[in-house]
Amino acid sequence: RLVREQNLMSLSKPSLHLISEYCRKVVAVCNESPRLTVTGVVFAGVTAFIVHSNHKFAQRANHPLGVHVKGSGRRKRTLVNAEFFRKVRKLIKIAVPGWTSREALQIYIFSCFLVMRTYLSIKVSDVNGTVVKAIVEVNFKQFIKAIGTLALFAIPSSTVNSMLKFLSNKLALAYRTRLVNHFNELYLQPMMYYKVTNIDSRIANPDQALTTTIDEWSRELSTLYSDLTKPLLDTILFSIRLAELLGIQGPLSAMTYYAFCAFAFRYLSPPLGRLTARSQELEGEFRRLHNRLITYCEEIAFYGGHKKEKSILNKAYEDIELHQSYMIDKEFYVGMLHGFLTKYGSFLLAYAVLALPVFGPGRAEYLSSIEDQTGVNQKGVITGDYIRNSNLYVNLARAIGKIVVSYGNIQKLAGYTSLVSDLHDVLDDLKDGKYVRTMTNPDLLEEKGLRPGNGHVSLEGDIIRFKDLSIVTPNGDILVEKLSLDITDGMSLMITGPNGCGKSSLFRILGELWPIFGGNVSKPKLTDMFYIPQKPYLTVGTLRDQVIYPQTREEYDELHDSDAGLAELFALVRCSNIVEREGGWDAVNDWIEVLSGGEKQQIAMARLIYHKPKYAIMDECTSAISIDLEGFMYVHCKKIGINLITVSHRPSLWMYHEYLLKFDGRGGWEFGPMVLPEGYQQGTA
């Protein structure tokens, strides 16, 4: 056998004359078969169609469907570039934080099983050749031995294959866990979740990126590691083994052929990265519209707007359908090309290479090396060699083919990477006080010296102070200029004015939800201020959680031995019946749906009294409560030392405030003591 393999090695150095003669024979055979010509014409036609289709729909991956864009210029065909590798490296560092991390350990174990899988494949190829050789030589003893060996290899092979799938899924889950925890830390920082959707305009649907896209990215990365690492390892080991048996031209021919395939795929494949990113955007928008329908279902029902909403949802789905149909069409045509080149083309090449020992330039040397003592060729040896070599070559071709085809998976990963990385960049920018939004009056803002972040916020004891504050919306609309006033302990303020004049906007600036374009704000620490909107927020949890929010149950238990204090609060705001009706303080329900508008506002007032802040910002928060109960709660809040800052159009509340801030809706304002009109009575003007 050693002599025969040494003779086979000599086949790797045939003369140029013999190679050219062999090639002429192959060409002559092709000329005799018109089917080859027809196949070539069909292949060329499919290729031309794909190229034309890619050119025709080149802009669909970049722009919304149905939108014609002029002068877009030349664009990059894919997202797989230096910027992609920078972004994916940044995300991988989050998913795998260190060489000794749990995720890194999983990768090491995964890699070991990949090596085992390749080793077993080589051994099984050798045994397959032995089985066929025994059959041809009618050697029953050798056949039984080979079958037994093959059965023994089947046990670890099946175990390793299942383990690879198991580890791939576990690795994807580990990646996702790391990314979700990391993004939750960024996204759920104070005010960050608000600013992503209301201040910055770059991310339309952050919920899509934080849930579905991160999951898809994790799965794609885990799958890609297996799809690249194993084929690379297979390529190296199978190439070495084939070079030992057939000479260097065996693995070299496969590598050259697939290099051509990679070149063809590079220029014939559609921009899957951009198409994937666009698909995620469309799915996110469709999901957002459904959530919007649920959020505003009552208003839509009152207006009878179901037809309009249906048309909006249908249009959103039509965009998804068109985009998905386009992707399916492209995958069909490109799949034909992939199948021809990577499957059938590789098999044709494999037969040509495997036939080299028998029909190629080194034919005489090979046949002489396998002759028996009588000078007759041992056909069993030829068959066994062919089966062994074909298994090795097919595995090599399959490995190289997977590397080539994985370029499409890399493009998909690039699409997911772009969406997740863009969200990360926006969160980093917002953390540094930067945001991107189209300004409505950039020239006017520049003229007045107003720009985001130009103001200053400071924590200063028990006082709320606005000094030369300009109230400007995030997109640059100037509502109020040069507002200056102090709100001190023991002082209650009423704020009035027409809609859109800046009343609620002032509180958004005070709460640091909006950037300050100019002026200074001084305020007490966050726990000394409490905001109650017209529609109170009710959290997921028990009835108790609705009162103590944002305090946790653990924090509550450290401060209180029983719920007696909560019962007193509910009696104070006259909603004790809710506790019995809903089944106690530990009852869990969809409180937004269960409670009426008045009950929600009563619970919000109970929450305010429970936390007892120094300042309460009340934005039309008692509009659904009776005037007598409203007055009783206002008096009680002032009695326990809560300073009230109220936005309301109800004259019944004037008497509970000592000062009045009035906006005129044209950028002007007035501040001074509250002067009740002559003849004023509670509930009248």
Image (tube, rainbow, N blue to C red):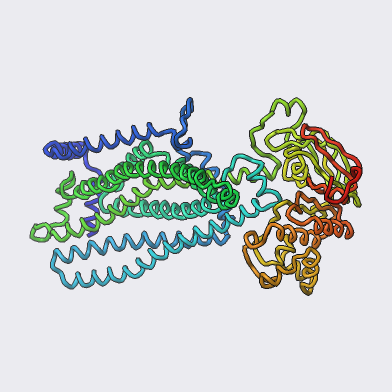
Question: Dividing the image into 4 quarters, which one contains the N terminus?
Answer: bottom left
Q: Is residue 234 left or right of residue 185?
A: left
Question: Is residue 414 something that shows in the picture?
Answer: no
* Quarter of the view holding residue 257: top left
* Percent position of residue 67, x then y: 47, 33
Residue farthest front in this picture: 679
Nearest the viewer among 253 and 339 is 339
* Quarter of the view holding residue 421: top right
* Percent position of residue 376, x then y: 9, 58
Height in image: 104 above or below 585?
above
Nearest the viewer among 108 and 414 is 414
Q: Is residue 353 left or right of residue 550?
A: left
In the image, what residue occupies the spot 34% across and 63% down?
Answer: 120
Height in image: 492 above or below 261?
below
Question: Is residue 143 something that shows in the picture?
Answer: yes
In the image, what residue occupies the spot 72% across and 58% down?
Answer: 598
In the image, what residue occupies the spot 38% across and 48% down?
Answer: 403
* Percent position of residue 336, x then y: 29, 44
Nearest the viewer among 569 and 340 is 569
Question: Dividing the image into 4 quarters, which one contains the C terminus?
Answer: top right
Q: Is residue 220 left or right of residue 367?
A: right
Nearest the viewer among 443 and 583 is 583
* Quarter of the view holding residue 119: bottom left
